[in-house]
Amino acid sequence: MTDPTTGRDRLRELLDAVLAEDNTRLSDMAGQAHASPFHFSRTFARDTGEPPVALRRRVLLERAAWQIGQGSGVTDAAFAAGYESVEGFTRAFARAFGHPPSATTAGSGRWLTAPNGVHFHPPFHLWVEENPKGRADMDLTAFQVHHDVDDTALLIGLAAELSEEEYRKVRSPGRTVLTWDGPEKSIAHSLDRLVWSKEVWLASIEGDDFPEHGEDDPASLRERHREAGARWIAAVGDIGRRGAWGDRLIDALCDPPESFVMGSVVVHVLTYAAHRRQLVRHMLREAGVEVGHGDPIEWLQDHYGGTT
């Protein structure tokens, strides 16, 4: 939207007013644009399809996601985005991206759905998509991936409260979930396989060598899962953003090499992870540990107030 009499880009002026560092209120934005708040808000929403305060909040959340992915602390990102508390920022971030700030990795979930295609572009620019996407429905794949990662972390935490004897006690002799993974007779076995399966598939997806199998004590598993879980979220998010579910992975880690469709790999991991998590729950109850059902409905309500 360029003014033919002056050559000014009026839309750019409006965006500058909305995104200026000090313009945290609608009145500040309108003042910079030399308009009343009512006229400014109406004009901006008409030309962009998004209220000015909503656009500012969204773009600053996108910037915060990039900053966290680059190593910034959540607290610093929260205050830089204009939030008065980390708790408020965490809730807003989780509703927008479908996962907490702590699960953000470099390149994961940088852009949110926008009616106008206006997005944050690092380090301090804007990017405007030619064909912006409309409002998306809940991303069910992302929902399941984040639920799996969070629920696994919960189970590892509960297992850490057990004695070594209870943790490694054989409870289901001969039980095998997948033949190539071997027997999963104890809590330790099943939790290890939950983490190990992601580590192996990530090595294939990322083109790394076959990973070394780490220690399976709860403290080591917690660290392995923290690292693998964040990478898994980022990897699946990247596949989704590229629409690459039908791409084929030629897995040279197999002998002989095998071909896998990416979508089937994700479904495979999610399917057996859900099965193993429930097996761990049964064993934890046998060990006298109170543990919930792992219901994704309850998880969503507890973490994000019932909505993404």
Image (tube, rainbow, N blue to C red):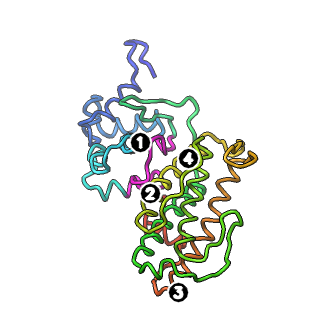
Marks 4 and 2, how far apart at CA: 14 Å
Q: Do the residues labelled 2 and 3 touch (CB within 8 Å)?
A: no
Q: In this view, does 277 lie above or below 3?
A: below
Mark 4: secondary structure: helix
Q: Residue 152, how many percent across, how many down?
A: 50, 66
Query: Which residue in the structure is indicated by mark 4?
Result: 235
- Residue at the image point whose x is 35% and y is 36% from the top: 39
Separation of marks 2 and 3 at Cα, in angstroms: 26 Å
Closer to the chain start, of discs 2 and 3, is 2
Crowd rating for badge 4 (residues with CA inside 10 Å; few <14, some 14–19, many 20+): some
Q: What residue type is labelled 4?
A: Ala
Residue range corresponding to the magenta coloring: 91-114
Corner quadrant of residue 218: bottom left
Q: How far apart are marks 3 and 4 (CA)?
A: 35 Å
Image x and y of residue 133, in percent? 57, 40
Whole-angstrom CA distance, mark 1 to mark 2, is 23 Å
* Residue labelled with disc 1: 62
250 left or right of 10 in image: right
Amino acid type indicated by mark 3: Glu
Residue 154 place in picture, x, y as percent: 45, 69
- Report the residue at 58% width, 44% height from top: 209
Instruction: Specify which label sits upstream in the sequence, 4 or 2.
Output: 2
Vertically, is 273 above or below 10? below
Q: What element carries label 2?
A: helix
Q: Residues within 10 Å of mark 3 (few under 14, many from 20)?
A: few
- Mark nearest the camera among 1 and 4 is 4
* Residue 105 within the magenta-colored segment of the rendering: yes
Label 1 or label 4, whichever comes before in sequence order:
1
